Amino acid sequence: MLASSRGFPRATFARMSPQMRLKAIWLLPPAAWFVVFLLVPYLITATYSFGHMQSYRYVPGFSLANYARIFTTAPYSGAIAQSAEIGLLTAVFSSILAYPVAMVMAFRVTRAAARSALYLLVILPWWASYLVKAYAWKTILGPHGILNSLLLSLHVVESPITILLYNTASVVLTLTYIFTPFAVLSIYASLERIPASLLEAAEDLGAGGMEIFWRIILPLSVPGLLAGGVITFALGFGDFVAPALLGGADTLMISTIMINLLGVANDRPLASAIGIIIVILAFLLIGVMGWAERRVTVRI
Amino acid sequence: MRAIGSSRALLAACVLVMLFLYLPLFVMVVMSFNAGDSVGLPFTGFSLAWYARLFGNAQIMHAIINSLIVAVGTVAISLPLGVMAAVGLDRYEFPGKAVFRRIVLLPLILPGVITGVSLLNFYIINGVRLSLATIIFGQGTALVCVSLTEVFARLQQLGRSQYEAAQDLGAGESECFFRVILPNISGAVVGAALISASISLDEIAVTYLLTGRQNTLPMVIWSLLRREATPLVNAAGTLMVVATAILVTLGLRLSRSGAEAAE
């Protein structure tokens, strides 16, 4: 289908029907671009992952040694597990924080202007610079940060406490902070579709607020929770900014390892193998999500 | 009106979460006007000194220009490709359509480091030297999905009747596009451009791996932060937050106003 032979444009174009020609004009440039700048690089990376480095040069090969190393050697499999743990905690905490905001947006604020104002208020922190947001928490939690200054001036503590920063908890807190607005938008998209008549009917039949929440609202919001959860998990899993700025010596995430492999260690085959594993995990995750959604989703 | 949304506990939780979202940014903005040298408290007096230092810093000014070049280049690549793909997907059926739509979204779902590694391998094999251009090609590819989804949604709303009417009246394809389709999707196109630009201005994972000697603003801030937290970053961060707030508010308003005008 694509321009594989050099004589492609003129010879093939002349033989096309006008309709086909239009189709080719709209679709070939983006398709060709994606093949060259996305598919080919991914394929190169897959090929690289089977080779190895020898005296700073890449040697092609077909060996599973890189993959074996990732699954059996300490930093790699451990880092994948820790990234997954941090991603999962991030997804859970941001969903919990996001839910009340999405509820208020969907059911409490009824005027269109007020609703879009709240929408904008939620979306602005989401778009604010990612790096800046991670940095903001560093200044809050740091030894000379706002929190310590406050505690010192209130004489709660005598000297600045250092346990606030540079550990896995501060990474999870920062990532939760960063991804909560996204979870709000995702959950809200589900809640918005719940027909008012359904809730009114439940009320008329004597259901209380909590019963309506547990038996109607929550089950119907599962698609939004899942979609938001999977993306916040993926973004948290692949993050390297927060662990670098706020993580401790024991916070080792997979993206950080990849960047180190590409920089100081210059082991691109191993980094490529990690990349391929993450791609496969991502596809598995998307598959599982599709399955879960079909299982749990209640149709109205 | 309804009991579900109006419980006090729910409202209180919502207010607390909103405070959680805004307090850190608020602290940073306030501290950027602090006269003192410390990143944290005490606030010793109002001053624009850090902004003056920021604009006097040649490295940062140079990085801002680089960031703007990258953002413009990224939009110049991703927007036309995204619009073309959106028109193609909206109008035609072809084998592999579902796969194509998935592949386009990959850079959004996968960690940026992976897109970065793949393009790095690709550049090294082809002997391309890393520069601002290599960043632009990387970000441009990753952000096609933004224009594609925005414009595609708008085209689906628009329907095909206007386009078919123009065709029946004898308009050629380019006339149809520039005089019928484009005016109708202009809001979504401008919105997508602004949103892509603001993502590009903030992008760090792809940039980190594909950058040569030239650095963008997030990269310079990143290297400043790795050394120590300085109030200079408060000022830079405040400006970045203000810039993205303007870009995104405008972008959203434009893509929505287009939709409302058509209804």
Image: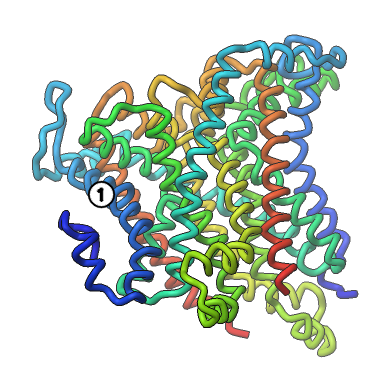
Residue position for label 1: A40
* Residue B36 point in image, percent of width and height: 78, 10
Q: Quadrant of the N terminus of chain A?
A: bottom left
Chain of the residue on which disc 1 is drawn: A
Depth check, front residue: B3 or A25: A25
Q: Quadrant of the C terminus of chain A?
A: bottom right
Mark 1, residues whose alpha carbon is within 10 Å: few (<14), some, or many (≥20)? some
* A16 sits left or right of B229 in the view: left
Depth check, front residue: A258 or A156: A258
Residue drawn at x 64%, y 44% is A127
* Residue A147 point in image, percent of width and height: 75, 26
Q: Is residue B112 above or below residue B45?
A: below
* A31 sits left or right of A51 in the view: right
What amino acid type should be assigned to the residue bearing mark 1? Val
Secondary structure under badge 1?
A: helix
In the image as oriented, which residue stretches furthest toward the left?
A61
Depth check, front residue: A99 or A47: A47
In the image as oriented, which residue stretches furthest toward the front?
B170
* Residue A58 point in image, percent of width and height: 15, 31
Asked which quadrant contains residue B247, the reply is top right
Q: Is residue B103 above or below residue B25?
A: below
* B75 sits left or right of B236 in the view: left
Residue drawn at x 42%, y 34% is B135
Residue drawn at x 79%, y 88% is A201
